Amino acid sequence: MNLQCLGDSFEGAETTRVGTFVWRISGQSGHQGLLQAGIASAETLTMTLEVPAELKAVGKADRQTVLERTGGGRAAECICRRVRDELEWAEAIRDAYADKKALARAKATAMRGNNSKQSFYLDNNGVLHKFDEGTAGELSYLEDAETRTGEALEKKWAAEGEFVAVKNQGNTAPAQSGSLNEVQSGASASTDPVACKVNMPTLARVRANCTPAIVLNAFSSHENVHAATCRKMNNRPIDTWDGYTIQLKPRAEIRGFAAPSSNYDAYMQSPANLAADEVAAYTAEIGVYTEFIKKRCDG
Ligand SMILES: [Zn+2]
């Protein structure tokens, strides 16, 4: 049987004594193959076998097999562009977290790590401390890092005529092309600080943002770093600032103050700890983008 090239797909028919079988191979790109792509640039190939009407009449169905082109094929240019933007954001925010001046300022102003409402933080020796009364700032260190990153990239990308990335907890999702500084909350992945379970964006979100599979893989690598730290932190008792040993998992309050939801939650309220965990997480995420660009994109 010969397969004929029909532009974006290959098709061939095989006539047998029970009827005609049709084979079709088409290429897709993006999460769950949402984008049609030429065979050469496809991330996945779908092979469809259409069975003859005679066989359908006796209950046989068409068959479809999806093959992932691991390491093969060139990604569509729009996917490469998206990955480069995500990479640029990830590198910039990693550096924003690690910024020594910003960390010193955070410490001096009792800035919380990722939740400005929290009363406690766990230091990296495993001791729980209470922030001074009335020192909760407007912004958490996470928001501070995202704001600094957003401002820096906004300027740079506006100068380059590109759309601007939007900030989000732990990750980023791009705005629609052409819209400046659009914030899409809840678009990204996150890690539950009590169960240490990674929550990926919903399929509806993925579709709305047209998030490619590669970007979801990178988000997942990022969150897995947090989840590992979370499990490490939550599996041990901690010492409080006044000498008691407890475990938060979750705990309603400590001496009349609302308690963090878990050891890991408390750990992430120290800007230095948060920065260390985010730097590790973004480093993992950056590794996924870099590898993809090297193998699948030009230039
Ligand atoms: Zn993160």
Image (cartoon, rainbow, N blue to C red):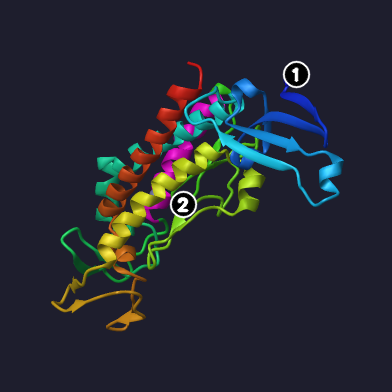
- Local SS, label 1: strand
x and y, in percent, of residue 98 in the image: 29, 41
Q: Residue at x 69, y 29 (%)?
A: 26
Foreground residue, 228 or 59? 59
Foreground residue, 103 or 225? 225
The amino acid beneath tag 1 is Gln
Which numbered circle lies on residue 169? Answer: 2
Which numbered circle lies on residue 223? Answer: none
x and y, in percent, of residue 185 in the image: 56, 53
Foreground residue, 258 or 52? 52
x and y, in percent, of residue 162 in the image: 58, 27
The residue lying furthest to the top in this view is 299
For the magenta stretch, what is the residue range? Answer: 140-159
241 lies left or right of 78: left
Residue 176 appears anywhere in the view: yes
Foreground residue, 196 or 11? 11
The amino acid beneath tag 2 is Gln
Q: Nearer the viewer, mark 2 or mark 1?
A: 1
Residue to which mark 1 is pinned? 4
Judge whether residue 139 is colored magenta. no
Q: Is the magenta stretch mostly helix, strand or loop?
A: helix
- Local SS, label 2: loop
Mark 1 within 8 Å of ligand 1, using the beta carbon: no
Residue 269 appears anywhere in the view: no
> Is 84 above or below relative to 213?
above
Mark 2 within 8 Å of ligand 1, using the beta carbon: yes
Q: Residue at x 21, y 72 (%)?
A: 237
